[in-house]
Image: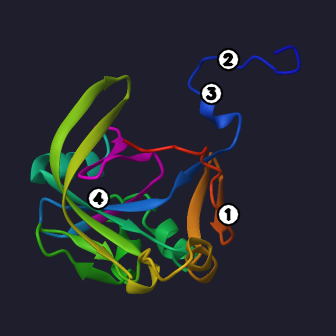
């Protein structure tokens, strides 16, 4: 490891190098019945039925998800980057995010929630549990109760994966400060005999 530089194990560890993450928008229901959206990149698909995202208890997204025991997740594409950025706008003095008024939405069906309109994948979740011993952050884990996808972006036996990615680019977040459009892909070289089981 003589050609590598040791990094300080402090709060800035992940800010020193770029890391690729999905960029999603989490939707939650506000106390007044309205809806809030917040972009998140610290999200993980845990099982086919569970996904989680990291949030702080001081954020409305966290408080709303815990109070309502539910949240939505929208996967925006590159054409939604401005809309996704608008969802990150800080709240005004009255507690409202005025930028959300111009964002088109679609109602969820299994839970009280909303999605960003036009996204490639939308997932409805019931809050399953919260892991709260991660310092200032907590991991909210949702159980997927419904999922919706654009028909052109669903993998199928009659299509090549790289064609789907080329025709429908993906949006990624390069922590801590960049975003990227993924429009090319190649098959992963799994070794012979590899199985996921």
Q: Residue drawn at (12%, 68%), measured in percent from left and top? A: 112
- Residue 152 lies, in percent from the top left, at 45, 85
Q: Secondary structure at mark 1?
A: loop
Q: Which mark is residue 8?
A: 2
Residues at discs 3 and 2 in contact (Cβ within 8 Å) = yes
Report how far apart the C-alphas of labels 1 and 3 lie in the structure.
30 Å
Residue 110 quadrant: bottom left
Q: Residue furthest right?
A: 3
- Residue 76 lies, in percent from the top left, at 46, 71
- Residue 175 lies, in percent from the top left, at 61, 46
Q: Which mark is residue 127?
A: none
Residue 26 quadrant: bottom left
Q: Nearer the viewer, residue 135 or 90?
A: 135
- Residue 45 lies, in percent from the top left, at 37, 49
Magenta span: helix, strand or loop, mainly? strand
- In the rendered structure, the answer to whether residue 5 lies left or right of residue 192 reads right
Specify which label sits upstream in the sequence, 1 or 2: 2
- Mark in the foreground, 1 or 2: 1
Q: Which residue is mark 1?
A: 186
Locate the N terminus by quadrant: top right
Locate the C terminus by quadrant: top left
Report how far apart the C-alphas of labels 4 and 1 lie in the structure.
45 Å
Report how far apart the C-alphas of labels 3 and 2 lie in the structure.
6 Å
Specify which label sits upstream in the sequence, 4 or 1: 4
Q: Which residue is mark 3?
A: 13
Q: Which residue is mark 4?
A: 95
Q: Which residues are magenta?
A: 36-57
């Amino acid at each position: 490891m003589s050609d590598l530089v040791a990094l300080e194990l402090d709060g800035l560890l992940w800010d020193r190098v770029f890391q690729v993450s999905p960029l999603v928008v989490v939707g939650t229901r506000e106390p007044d019945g309205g809806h809030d959206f917040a972009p998140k990149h610290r999200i993980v698909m845990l099982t086919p039925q569970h996904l989680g995202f990291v949030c702080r208890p001081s954020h409305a997204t966290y408080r709303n998800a815990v109070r309502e025991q539910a949240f939505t997740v929208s996967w925006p594409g590159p054409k939604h980057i401005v809309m996704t950025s608008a969802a990150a706008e800080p709240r005004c003095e009255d507690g409202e995010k005025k930028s959300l008024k111009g964002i088109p939405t679609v109602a969820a069906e299994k839970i009280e929630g909303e999605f960003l309109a036009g996204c490639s994948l939308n997932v409805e979740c019931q809050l399953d549990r919260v892991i709260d011993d991660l310092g200032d952050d907590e991991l909210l884990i949702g159980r997927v109760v419904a999922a919706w996808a654009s028909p052109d972006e669903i993998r199928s036996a009659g299509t090549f994966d790289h064609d789907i990615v080329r025709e429908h680019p993906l949006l990624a977040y390069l922590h801590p400060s960049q975003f990227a459009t993924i429009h090319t892909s190649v098959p992963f070289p799994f070794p012979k005999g590899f199985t996921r089981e």
